[in-house]
Structure formats: C-alpha cells, structure tokens
Image (cartoon, rainbow, N blue to C red):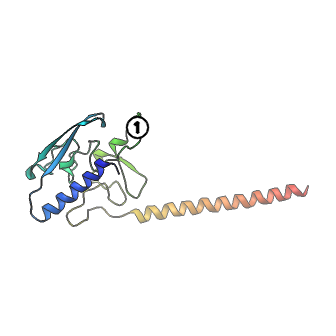
Amino acid sequence: LSPESKWSIILVLFALSSSALGDQVVIRCNWQQTIFGRNVANTSRMTQVVPDGMVNDGYCDCPGGEDEFLTSACSGVALWAGSVSDESNNDEDDGSAEHFSCRIEDVSIHLSHVNDGICDCCDGSDEVVDEYGSHNCPDTCHGILQKRRQEQTERNEKFQKGFAQRKNDIAEQSLF
C-alpha cells in the first residue's frame, strides 16, 4: 500500500470509531500539487480541517476524497480510498488511477461504478460497508471460483490427454 492509502485507511477507521461513539468527526485533508492524478511537488502540502457536518455529505471537500469515504461523491479522484494506487515509476498513463480492483476477482471497474448501488465485484468490495460491517451485495464468489476451478481441471485433462498421445507417437516413431 502507498503511504496515502495507509493514511486514508487510518482516517476511515478513526472516523468510523469516532462516529460510533458519538464523538465529533474531524477529517484533515492533505493538499498537494497534482497533474493528472500524479504528485509533482510533495513540498507544497497544506492541511484543511473538514468539520463533522461536511463529512460524507456528498461533496468532495478534500482533493483526495478523504471526507467522502462512505459515499461515491469522490469516486473520480485518483487518491480516493477505493482507487488503485499507481506505485510504478513509468510515465505512461495507463488509466489505473481511474479504476478500482475487486479484492477476489481479477476485475477492474471504473471509479464511477464504486458505491453506486450495483454490485460489480463478486464479494461486494466495490460497495459501501455499513456500520455493522455488511453491505447489500450477495457473495457470488464461490460460484465464480468453482467455474474457474472446473475450467482449470478441463484444461489439465486436455493437456494430460495430449501429452499421453504425444508420448505414444514418439514411442511409435522410435520403433522405426
């Protein structure tokens, strides 16, 4: 995880624990100069405090989306907690900063589809988890993984059959 992702997770956990206890939630936004979602100057950081009433209100007050961790309001922001961090050093923009990777499946969805009420990931990892730790997405990963295991078994059987046939063909050729 990138340092920004770690801090976002810590802020989310702090905010959730504070709101469960009835304390006032205060989020600190980290401002930094970015171009197309990439940091260009880490020295120009400033901090903004977002009061409780402006947290999860459907409006991005922080440029990184730290104040909207339970809504999809900041889903287009590259540093949003649900986005995939780009830790590579290449200069090519492959669009990964605009996508969310499902936890179990090898599926990448656009950030605008995160927290939209539609379960795109088989485990529901693209949707909001409520205060009880659940969401309205059925876990369909077992069926998907079972299908993948069946396909892998079929590929292995075809390989073994072809390998045995090749072995027989080589043995027959060596007799001549």
Instruction: Please state the horizontal and vertical placement of residue 21, each as a whole percent of the image.
Output: 12, 65
- Residue position for label 1: 94
Q: Nearer the viewer, residue 76 or 90?
A: 90
Instruction: Please say whether residue 115 is visible from this viewpoint.
Output: no
Q: Residue at x 18, y 60 (%)?
A: 16
Instruction: Please state the horizontal and vertical placement of residue 130, each as a whole percent of the image.
Output: 21, 62
**Element type at mark 1:** loop
Q: Residue at x 46, y 62 (%)?
A: 145
Q: Which quadrant would residue 142 be assigned to in this image?
A: bottom left
Q: Which quadrant would residue 39 be assigned to in this image?
A: top left
Instruction: Please state the horizontal and vertical placement of residue 110, each as a whole percent of the image.
Output: 33, 45
Identify whether 32 is placed above or below 84.
Answer: above
Instruction: In the displayed orientation, state which residue is furthest to the right.
Output: 176
Q: Nearer the viewer, residue 25 or 165?
A: 25
Instruction: Please state the horizontal and vertical placement of residue 66, each as a whole percent of the image.
Output: 21, 48
Q: Give neighbour class at mark 1: few <14, some 14-19, many 20+ (Cα, 10 Å).
A: few
Q: Residue at x 71, y 58 (%)?
A: 163
Instruction: In the displayed orientation, state which residue is furthest to the front.
Output: 43
Q: Residue at x 26, y 42 (%)?
A: 77
Instruction: Please say whether residue 58 is visible from this viewpoint.
Output: yes
Amino acid marked by disc 1: Asp
Q: How many marks?
A: 1
Q: Nearer the viewer, residue 110 or 32?
A: 32
Q: Which quadrant would residue 128 be assigned to in this image?
A: bottom left
